[in-house]
Image (cartoon, coloured by chain):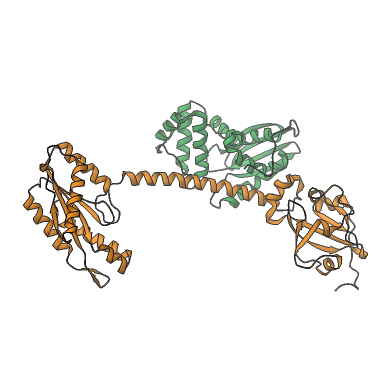
Chain colours: A green, B orange
Amino acid sequence: MHGLLNRSIQGFLRRTYGEAVWHDVAARAGLGPDGFEAMLDYDDNLTDRVINAAALRLDRPRDALLEDLGTYLVSHPDLERLRRLLRFGGTGFVDFLHSLDELPDRARMALPELELPELDLNEQRPDRFRLMCKSPLIGAGHVILGLLRAMADDYGSLAVLEHEGSWPEGEIIRIDLLDPRFSEGRRFDLAGVA
Amino acid sequence: MDGGMTLPGLTLDIISLARLMPMYLSLTEDGRIAEVGPTLAKLLPKDAAGQDFFALFEISRPGNVRDMAGLAARTGDRLHLVRRDESRTSLRGLAVPLKGGQGMLLNLSFGITVAEAVRDHDLTDADFAPTDLAMELLYLIEAKTAVMGELRAMNRRLEGARSEAEERALTDTLTGLRNRRALDLALAELVARGQPFGLMHLDLDWFKAVNDTLGHAAGDHVLRMVAGVLRAQTRAGDTVARVGGDEFVILLPGLVDAERMRIIAARIIARLEEPMDYQGVSTRVSASIGMAASTAYDRVLGDRMLADADSALYEAKRQGRGRAELHVPD
């Protein structure tokens, strides 16, 4: 998996649980304390080992940890730029959901070697969507689930999201939109961060 | 010209037009602003309608378009416009005639200056038509900045690791001899162990001439040859270090006899004076050596011995180069 993704996992563990936890996790996963470099490629197994080691060290279910990772990616102030890149997907949450299909292409536009999970949105009713997520990382759907929950908040939409399990063709997330304009949401200033 | 031909037309209300082209602008026959798209309106004064288009915008390219006749002559051409105000927002677009000589319609865009325009005029994603690639351009600018940030951070980390590694390194990368740091460590160890030792400070003579006449590659070649000579003329337990451009220090554990030191130094100088070949050109250098023996001191200090060997070296140079001098304590 791309170093940028691995480095976000590393950043999540370090910022959320502290340096000592990260050092334990890195050691258990057989990784040096400096961890991942953003612009290098790593074996998928290594990513898996890091996540498993973190779940073990923190005594948290792997799925819950992955979901927290997704939420962190959108809501941590240090990752404001990533939130912004996601917000470029659409003017509202539904618009954003529809932009998920092209997320891997957008990512490749910025970094040709970056492989994101394949996402396929299915609109079943105007207020119900099912998202198929396919990735070499087992449980990537939980990361997407956490990320979508945070993005719904970001857009000020009220939605209920649920992981409906894994199938051979991918993981499925159900999204029930209760109120697209539930709150103000967070401001998205196109002019961007300094 | 298609003046005589009547082509089929479309009728569109201005709300639909504004959706399709939020930066459209329609001009009356006499060059006054009739209608303005909602995004373009953000760049203009509130009372822009009815004002002279050419007073609000300058057409920077092509040149000499200053009135409606000039604009009509450029129908369909790429136009570069600059807003005549302190923002100097630059725009591009094209102008086409409206049916029945009712003026002209312009469609404008920000082009690559979109990021500044967004900042200057407080635009949002709703200000761009879905067909406009402005959002993708803004996205790319941000994504590129993010990637560059990661790359810079990575470079900083690598640079840090490199200088750390360099600091820890004990080898002179050009010659493969020990470096200054390794010398300091070896010297400190000899002093700490209280083992008698001899020290030679060697400086090449005429080396600058090689560098100046044959270039740095030749100079580097000579330094490697010199390193080879020094290695060959010393024992496995001796420390041979390159401590400056053409300066070397040799530590000789157990060797403190003045006569033996002189013999070794003379042999080194003789070997260094043999012609060296660089790409078919024969070059010659020599060396001056200053020496010190630890047994000459009541209390051995590494720095002191280095300084004394340096003085002896200076004396050797003064006496005509190509020779070795032993420091004699007062």
Q: Is residue B210 left or right of residue A33?
A: left
Q: Position of residue A120 (x, y in %)?
A: 65, 44
The residue at 59%/34% (across/down) is A77
The quadrant in which residue B272 appears is: bottom left
B302 lies above or below B61? above
Q: Position of residue A39 (x, y in %)?
A: 49, 47
Q: Nearer the viewer, residue A40 or B35?
A: B35
Residue sitting farthest toward the top: A59
Q: Position of residue A103 (x, y in %)?
A: 63, 46
Q: Is residue A74 left or right of residue B20?
A: left
The quadrant in which residue A26 appears is: top left
B202 lies above or below A134? below
Q: Nearer the viewer, residue A31 or B245?
A: B245
- Report the quarter where the C terminus of chain A lies: top right
Q: How many marks?
A: 0
A193 lies above or below B318? above
The residue at 24%/64% (across/down) is B206
Q: Is residue B212 left or right of residue A104?
A: left
Q: Position of residue B94 (x, y in %)?
A: 78, 62
Res A1 visible: no
Res A96 visible: yes
Q: Is residue A127 left or right of residue B11?
A: left
